[in-house]
């Protein structure tokens, strides 16, 4: 019989890698670990300087609500200009 | 036993009804749900059949685990040839219908023919009757369901219905059950309408015997813990699926203004937290609910907070409605999203297709390809909320030249609009894309290009690719249940390893669709959710059937290949922009302009993309043209299809 109840599946074993209280920067190749203080509504990535608004699912469980538009828009425009100059 | 649920063949032309058992050897090859439906479609349809003709079989099913002690077996699947694409039509929805159908004695229905007058099918504890629908034809999806309950004098009846859009043969009309459980994509509601079939109503009280009930319940506790402990499901249980749109918009992965931008700026009013506030304001703190047997509770309830429809009750909105009535047309009002969501729920239309196709029309309008004369004076510019909502109604009721054309789907409409309108249509195989923008995510681009029912995020999307999981974690996921020795990349802007991830996800999603379980309970949005290694236990305890993870993988491969065989029979060719595994040129030519610094300036590299397709075909056992190799069909036991076992 293929069923072994006691054996932990790969998906179950990955649970130990889970973290609360932190999230990753939304900039793909940055992905810096951001750890807002409890109740913070704003966080800045120390690596790429992107800024995000923070919402809290629970007291210990923050998520990115969205970008700080003015800040990240300028970063995007700068990056776009640089990339287009290089083409 | 759960396995004694039967299949019914119903001919609406003649009124003939035949009931058969589902043989165990068929179960062992296709399980149930979508996989077995695909087998039935290939076997019960003729090449080139008219999607809106009586010979197109409409197939309705629950999964093999539906209504057992397994968790979240709520899914109903519907399949037929699609009036939107001319290829595989398929939709899948939550709610309570499939369990009720199982309790009424059936796992699969094959409906052929066309009723002489509007009709509905009533299934009750093994009995099936075709009834007159004169009192429900013309009603909205919700009113139709309530009218059936009143007519049958039973408030526990669960119905699957088409709305006015299905009756009007809108090519992307939905099948609906409950308030907002939508079988969207590919126009299965139009197939119902074409058969004069308004609804299928079910009521069942027949026991389902569980093979090992104590063990099934014990194991399900562990399964539930695995489901509910996932961060993504905790978030979904608070914010619903809008959290997906919010996160994706944050980094620049959503289409805006059709395909001109990849982020909807200053969208604070349609962000998930704002929508959650409205739900709480209008429905109180306990506004999240769920489908049958599910603990995630991702379904929000709300009332429209203001405007002409103030106070109307609905559920959702799903992330797809944020895209359809928010990001794509660049309308950043929560009220517009909630009203648009309400309209498509009531009319029974696919929110994804509606939002995409109106946004396409808006771009054509701004380019002058269609004019205000064509729109009867409607100012169809981006950001015009009222024009957007007006178009939803016009499409449903086919009012005016533009809306009537759009109601036939984008490809047909492009032939009417002419000029270079097709160049701006974001679709694959005739089905519009989700609101997402895949120019910065090659793996996701490969997914939508090769998905069996058109541009589709629910067939093979490697969504966890966006989490930048370490390579050893990716290997642990994607190296099971069959080994994978190639490279995998944590970087979602890369091309390396993505074909395998898409192939793996394609089999994973087919697996849950055969079981009848929701995708939020597998490796879709969370890396720690159950998949092939976990499913044999659930299957054994509930049905008594023994499978290894490798066997389940092979079944999923087989079922996906059956879908491929159907599409090839109906004209799929690799590079065809209308019926192939190819993307619109804009993916390759127009760089992204918004979002995170590492996202802007991205296009899909066409050479690398073509190589990804080659590699994906290799994994699937297809040749360079996308056709199955002889040895692949032999390995999967498909050399004699259609084999007419059922």
Image: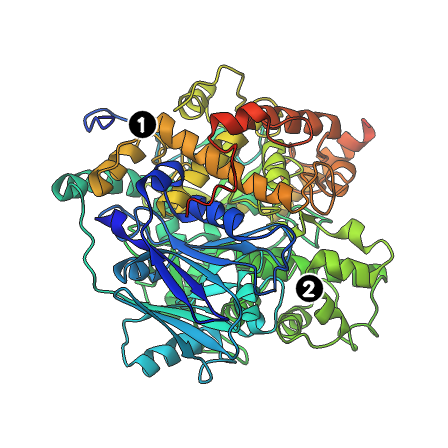
Mark nearer the viewer, 2 or 1: 1
Q: Tell me the element at label 1.
A: loop
Judging from the image, mark 1 belongs to the subunit labelled B
The location of residue B522, given as percent across then percent down, is 38, 39
The chosen color scheme is rainbow
Q: Quadrant of residue B532?
A: top left
Q: In this view, does B333 lie above or below A6?
A: below
Residue B400 lies left or right of residue B233; in this view the side is: right
Count of labels in the image: 2
- Identify the residue at image location x=66%, y=46%: B262
Q: Quadrant of residue B18?
A: bottom left
The location of residue B501, given as percent across then percent down, is 52, 28
Give the crowd class for mark 2: few <14, some 14-19, many >=20 residues within 10 Å: some
The answer to whether residue B303 of the structure is visible from this angle is no
Gap in Å between the C-alphas at discs 2 and 1? Answer: 44 Å
Judging from the image, mark 2 belongs to the subunit labelled B
The answer to whether residue A12 of the structure is visible from this angle is yes
Pick the front one: B398 or B425: B398
First in sequence: mark 2 vs mark 1: 2
The location of residue B390, given as percent across then percent down, is 65, 74
Q: In this view, does B36 lie above or below B540?
A: below
Give the residue at mark 2.
B408
Pick the front one: B499 or B260: B499
Give the residue at mark 1.
B548
Q: In this view, does B517 lie above or below B413?
A: above
């Amino acid at each position: 019989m293929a069923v072994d109840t006691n054996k932990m599946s790969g998906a179950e074993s990955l649970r130990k890698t889970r973290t609360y209280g932190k999230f990753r920067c939304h900039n793909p190749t940055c992905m810096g670990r951001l750890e807002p203080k409890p109740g913070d509504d704003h966080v800045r990535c120390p690596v790429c300087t992107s800024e995000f608004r923070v919402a809290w699912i629970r007291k210990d469980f923050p998520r990115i609500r969205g970008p700080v538009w003015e800040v990240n828009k300028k970063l995007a425009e700068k990056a776009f200009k640089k990339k287009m100059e290089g083409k | 036993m759960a396995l004694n649920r039967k299949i019914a063949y119903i001919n609406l032309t003649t009124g003939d009804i035949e009931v058969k058992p589902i043989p165990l050897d068929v179960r062992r090859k296709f399980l149930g749900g979508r996989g077995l439906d695909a087998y039935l479609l290939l076997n019960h349809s003729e090449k080139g059949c008219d999607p809106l003709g009586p010979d197109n079989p409409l197939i309705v099913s629950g999964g093999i685990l539906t209504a057992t002690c397994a968790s979240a077996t709520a899914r109903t699947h519907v399949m037929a040839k699609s009036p939107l694409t001319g290829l595989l039509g398929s939709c899948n929805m939550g709610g309570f219908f499939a369990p009720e159908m199982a309790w009424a004695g059936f796992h699969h229905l094959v409906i052929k023919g066309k009723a002489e007058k509007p009709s509905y099918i009533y299934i009750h504890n093994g009995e099936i009757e075709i009834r007159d629908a004169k009192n429900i034809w013309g009603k909205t999806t919700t009113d139709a369901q309530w009218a059936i309950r009143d007519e049958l004098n039973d408030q526990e009846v669960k119905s699957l219905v088409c709305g006015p859009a299905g009756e009007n043969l809108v090519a992307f009309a939905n099948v609906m059950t409950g308030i907002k459980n939508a079988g969207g994509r590919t126009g299965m509601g139009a197939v119902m309408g074409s058969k004069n079939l308004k609804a299928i109503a079910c009521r069942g009280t027949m026991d389902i015997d569980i093979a090992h009930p104590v063990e099934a319940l014990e194991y399900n506790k562990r399964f539930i813990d695995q489901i509910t402990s996932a961060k993504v499901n905790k978030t979904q249980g608070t914010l619903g699926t809008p959290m997906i749109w919010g996160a994706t918009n944050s980094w620049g992965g959503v289409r805006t203004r059709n395909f001109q931008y990849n982020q909807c700026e200053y969208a604070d009013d349609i962000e998930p937290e704002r929508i959650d506030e409205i739900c709480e304001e209008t429905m109180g703190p306990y506004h999240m609910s769920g489908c049958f047997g599910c603990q995630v509770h991702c379904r929000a309830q709300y009332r429209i907070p203001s405007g002409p429809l103030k106070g109307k009750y609905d559920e959702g909105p799903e992330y797809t409605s944020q895209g359809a009535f928010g990001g794509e047309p660049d309308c950043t009002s929560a009220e517009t999203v909630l009203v648009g969501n309400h309209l498509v729920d009531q009319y029974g239309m696919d929110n994804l297709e509606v939002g995409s196709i109106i946004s396409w029309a808006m771009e054509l309008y701004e380019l002058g390809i269609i004019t205000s004369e064509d729109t009867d004076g409607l100012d169809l510019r981006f950001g015009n909320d009222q024009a957007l909502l007006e178009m939803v109604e016009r499409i449903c009721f086919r009012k005016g030249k533009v809306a009537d054309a759009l109601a036939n789907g984008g490809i047909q409409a492009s032939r009417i609009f002419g000029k270079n309108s097709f160049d701006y249509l974001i679709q694959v195989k005739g089905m519009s894309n989700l609101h997402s923008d895949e120019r910065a995510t090659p793996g996701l681009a490969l997914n939508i290009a090769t998905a069996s029912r058109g541009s589709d995020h629910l067939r093979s999307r490697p969504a966890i690719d966006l989490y930048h999981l370490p390579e050893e974690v990716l290997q642990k996921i994607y190296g099971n249940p069959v080994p994978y020795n190639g490279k995998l990349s944590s970087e979602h802007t890369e091309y390396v390893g993505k074909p395998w991830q898409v192939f793996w996800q394609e089999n994973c999603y087919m697996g849950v669709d055969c079981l009848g379980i929701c995708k939020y309970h597998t490796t879709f949005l969370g890396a720690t959710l159950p998949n092939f290694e976990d499913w044999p236990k659930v299957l054994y305890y509930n049905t008594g059937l023994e499978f290894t993870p490798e066997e389940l993988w092979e079944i999923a491969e087989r079922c996906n290949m059956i879908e491929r065989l159907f599409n090839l029979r109906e004209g799929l060719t690799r590079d065809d922009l209308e019926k192939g595994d190819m993307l619109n040129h804009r993916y390759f030519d127009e760089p992204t302009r918004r979002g995170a610094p590492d996202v802007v300036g991205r296009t899909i590299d066409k050479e690398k993309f073509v190589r990804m397709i080659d590699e994906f075909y290799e994994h699937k056992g297809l040749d360079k043209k996308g056709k199955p190799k002889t040895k692949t069909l032999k390995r999967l036991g498909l050399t004699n299809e259609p084999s007419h076992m059922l």
